Amino acid sequence: MKKDYPVPAGYLERETEVKKSRFIARVAPVGSRDEVKDWLEQAHRDHPDARHICWAYQIGRPGSAAEAAMNDDGEPSGTAGKPILNVIQHKDMGDVLVMVIRYFGGIKLGAGGLVRAYAGAAESVLSEVDREVHKPMLDAQVTLSFADEQPLRHWCEVHGASVQSVEYGASVFARVLVPEDQKSVFGAFCDAQKLDYSFER
């Protein structure tokens, strides 16, 4: 099964208007519920006078997301968060949060109108955001000598891994993010260099 999946490459904002109501859609890459919370708090700071800030997100692989949630923020049930989430799922994108900030324009849209407006706002921003491919990574702990640090860094550069931290003591302890599809290659490298390593669960 292919494990890579598209995620938003960054933040993007787009605005649409429906019967004088303003819908400001924001998309952001997220990897945790805490990041979702941070983005929502920022939206409330930026738009304290908005009537509604509705949202939906999914974290993980599209089609089998580890986590997904939505919120209508006072709009009639099912008219805001669900349409936003439906568009996210249709776009086959993971690790994504879409917020739609609404300023009421004085004309009621009705349930069907709200569904179309929120889905349209989500579509406007998701269709324009750049995508990049998420590659699942593994966390490896490596114990090595000072002389082995440079070969380890070189291996990481060549294989798309990254050294996250290094601690120097009697030995050197490194934390390395290794692409999941390079796990066995990394193991072979460590065995060849006689390095102690383990993958965090």
Image: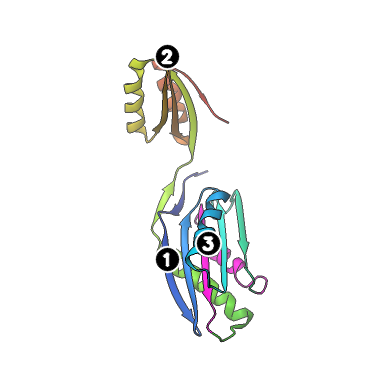
Q: Secondary structure at mark 2?
A: loop
Q: Which residue is pictured at 62% across the width and 64% down the height?
A: 71
The reply to whether discs 2 and 1 touch (Cβ–Cβ < 8 Å) is no
- Residue 122: image location, x then y, percent: 50, 68
On the image, which quarter does residue 58 sit in?
A: bottom right
- Residue 181: image location, x then y, percent: 46, 35
Q: Secondary structure at mark 1?
A: strand
On the image, which quarter does residue 171 sit in?
A: top left
Q: Which residue is pictured at 52% across the width and 70% down the height?
A: 101
Q: Amino acid at mark 2?
A: Lys
Going from N to C along the chain, the mark reached first, 3 or 2, is: 3
- Residue 35: image location, x then y, percent: 52, 51
The reply to whether discs 3 and 2 touch (Cβ–Cβ < 8 Å) is no
Distance from disc 3 to disc 2, alpha carbons, whole Å, reads 46 Å
Q: Which mark is residue 131?
A: none
Looking at the picture, tell me which residue is in the foreground, 124 or 89: 124
Q: Which residue is mark 1?
A: 13
- Residue 117: image location, x then y, percent: 53, 76
Q: Give the image's coloring scheme.
A: rainbow
Q: Which mark is residue 194?
A: 2
Q: Amino acid at mark 1?
A: Glu
Q: Residue 90 colored magenta?
A: yes
Residue density around tag 1, few if under 14, some if 14–19, many if 20 or more, within 10 Å: some
Distance from disc 1 to disc 3, alpha carbons, whole Å, reads 15 Å
Magenta region: which residues? 76-105
Q: Which mark is residue 88?
A: 3
Residue density around tag 2, few if under 14, some if 14–19, many if 20 or more, within 10 Å: few
Q: Residue 8 colored magenta?
A: no
Q: Amino acid at mark 3?
A: Ile
